[in-house]
Each structure stands twice: as C-alpha cells, then as structure tokens.
Image: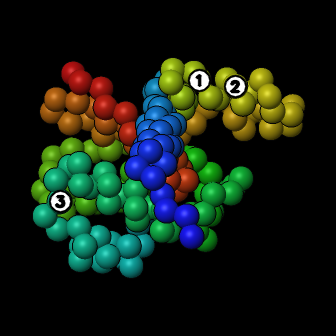
Amino acid sequence: MKKFSFGCMKKMLLGIVVVVVCICAVLNGFGLVKTSNRPDANYPLSIQIRERIQTEGMGLTPEECIKYSLKLTSENLKFTERNSIANGKANCVGYAILCSSICNYALQINHLNYKSKPAVGYVTFYGINLCDVLKALAPQEVKNYVKDHDFVELELDDKVVFFDACLYDYHIDGTTIIRK
C-alpha cells in the first residue's frame, strides 16, 4: 500500500482550495440592476403563510426578513413559464411578487417601517447583462420572455437591497447592495 507524501497532500489541498475559490467566484459574480418598478404587484398571502411567518418570523431584522422571504418563497414556488402562485408555480414575475409580499408581512409583524416592492431589470454576471446575452442566443419565440428579469427591492436607511428568489432557488446569491 502506497503512502501519501507531504508533497502529494500539499498539491491535493491546493487543488481543493482552487476549486472552492473558483466556485465562490462564479456564485458571487452575479448582480441585479433595476430599470423600472413592476406596477400593481401585490399578492394576498394565504392564512397558512401568514401564520407561518407569525410563528417563525418574530424578532427578525430587515436583513433577516430578506433571507426569510427568499427561503419561504423558494419553498412555496417552482419555476415555470406561466404564473400560478396559488398552485405553487411561477416565473420571475411571480417569484418577485410573492417574495415581496412575504418580506413585507415579515417587516410588518416586526414593526419595521420599510416596504419591499417588485422591480424590473436584469441579471449581471461580472457586469455582463445576461438578459442581453440570452436575447442574442434565444430562439425568436422566446426572445420576449428573456428581455428582462424581476426581483425585489428594499430601501433601507443607508442602502438599497435588490434580492432575487429565482436565483436563490438555484442556489445563487444575486443580492446586490447599493449604498446611499
């Protein structure tokens, strides 16, 4: 049986570190850019979701309300082409609407005077507009579908936070913070 030499272990550890750094770089390279607001975007939460937020969401900070709303939205929706939030299916518009409603209710029960809202914009990867890339590559029949992307905006005292339940559903943190 062959024993590992110190040099071999050192190379193996270096390889693991490089892989972890690369994965982190890819996952942290995403961002969100707002171009407009989503008009009339409010979703009435079910009694079950309200009760769950009341049970699990007490004592949260605004940042914790964001994380909680991402998690709860992801648990309640699966991505599909058309919105049917009541049936647990939605596209990015539905994800943003439900996530914003959950966040607002969590903020409300914690007596935090902030209000999130769905926003329209695009996803970037290291500054590259991914919606533009998808429009260039997509077949004609889906070009309108990838023209923009919906996510949630929450304006706090010293910053604006954009967060995306769709990206969260795919284990990608696209949270973007803009300092005022």
Quickly name the residue at label 1: 129
Q: Amino acid at mark 2?
A: Val
Q: Amino acid at mark 3?
A: Leu
Task: Identify whether 103 is placed above or below 134.
Answer: below
Pick the quarter of the image with the N terminus. Answer: bottom right
Q: Going by the image, does 112 lie left or right of 106? A: left
Q: In percent of the image, x 45 and y 53: which residue is there?
A: 5
Foreground pick, 38 / 4: 4
Q: Considering only order in the chain, which callout, 1 or 3, is on the residue closer to the N terminus? A: 3
Please tell me whether mark 2 sits on a helix, a strand or a loop.
helix
Q: In percent of the image, x 40 and y 62: which residue is there?
A: 71
Could you tell me if the residues under marks 2 and 1 are in contact, i.e. CB atoms within 8 Å?
yes
Residue 31 percent location from the top left of the image: 46, 31
Q: Which mark is drawn over residue 133?
A: 2
Q: Which mark is drawn over residue 60?
A: 3
Residue 170 percent location from the top left of the image: 55, 53
Foreground label between 3 and 1: 1
Report the label total: 3
Tell me how far mark 2 sits from mark 3, CA to CA. Answer: 38 Å
Residue 57 percent location from the top left of the image: 23, 67
Residue 139 figure quarter:
top right
